[in-house]
Amino acid sequence: DVKVTQSSRYLVKRTGEKVFLECVQDMDHENMFWYRQDPGLGLRLIYFSYDVKMKEKGDIPEGYSVSREKKERFSLILESASTNQTSMYLCASRGSEKYGYTFGSGTRLTVV
Amino acid sequence: GQSLEQPSEVTAVEGAIVQINCTYQTSGFYGLSWYQQHDGGAPTFLSYNALDGLEETGRFSSFLSRSDSYGYLLLQELQMKDSASYFCAVRGSGGGADGLTFGKGTHLIIQP
């Protein structure tokens, strides 16, 4: 089974801090994604990457950046955390489209 | 861009059949997917339809009509464990270098 591992299940950070969310997949997938999930809003795409060092903005990239230095690792960075970035963050990877995305278990980030 | 509409909540009885509808608007179209998410869990992939028609996987089936920009997920022989949120999702661009856009989810409540 493909595994997508997110480094933290829960995080509490202060406003203005720089925050790193890490994601690692073990199936050599080229495509990796970061989503945030908020009640009533569903999952919204922040950034994705289709290859090492390649990144593309999703629907809500403002306030975020990403890094993909190795194929298996995709990091989401909050340059200066704000309270409106309190959310559940989900990382996913994808191989063949017909097998869909595999999601990590999520990081619930609270910014205080 | 892409947008999807699905009911926010559906209630059904254990052992019955339920259909969750999804309509979408997208500039391009590269398939309709369905995901299941239990409370506190990660979304898990259920099905993918690239062509018109019905795809069956056990108790779950998914249907697509590209001419109507419409699809549905059919769950048969409902079990209590099927209580979850269900998301439809589309990818609007080709080449693999694009993320899924998700609907806001349908909360399925199963009553005994």
Image: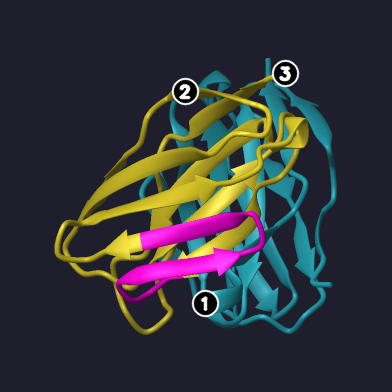
Chain colours: A cyan, B yellow
Q: Is residue A45 visible?
A: no
- The amino acid type, in three-letter code, at marker 2 is Glu
* Residue drawn at the location 49% of the way across and 44% of the way down: B87
Left or right side of A67 for B101:
left
> Circle 2 sits in a helix, a strand or a loop, which is it?
strand
Q: Is residue B59 magenta?
A: yes
* Residue drawn at the location 47% of the way across and 23% of the way down: B9
- The amino acid type, in three-letter code, at marker 3 is Pro
Q: Nearer the viewer, residue A101 or A66?
A: A101
Do the residues bearing badges 3 and 1 touch, measured as CB atoms within 8 Å?
no
- Residue B92: image x %, image y %? 29, 66
User: Split into 4 quadrants, where in the image is the C terminus of chain A?
Assistant: top right
Q: Nearer the viewer, residue A69 or A45?
A: A45
Q: Which mark is residue B9?
A: 2
- Residue A13: image x %, image y %? 74, 26
Measured in 3D between alpha carbons, the distance from the residue under mark 1 to the one under mark 2, in whole angstroms, is 28 Å
Q: Which residues are magenta?
A: B49-63
The quarter holding residue B12 reads top right
Measured in 3D between alpha carbons, the distance from the residue under mark 3 to the one under mark 2, in whole angstroms, is 17 Å
Measured in 3D between alpha carbons, the distance from the residue under mark 3 to the one under mark 1, in whole angstroms, is 36 Å
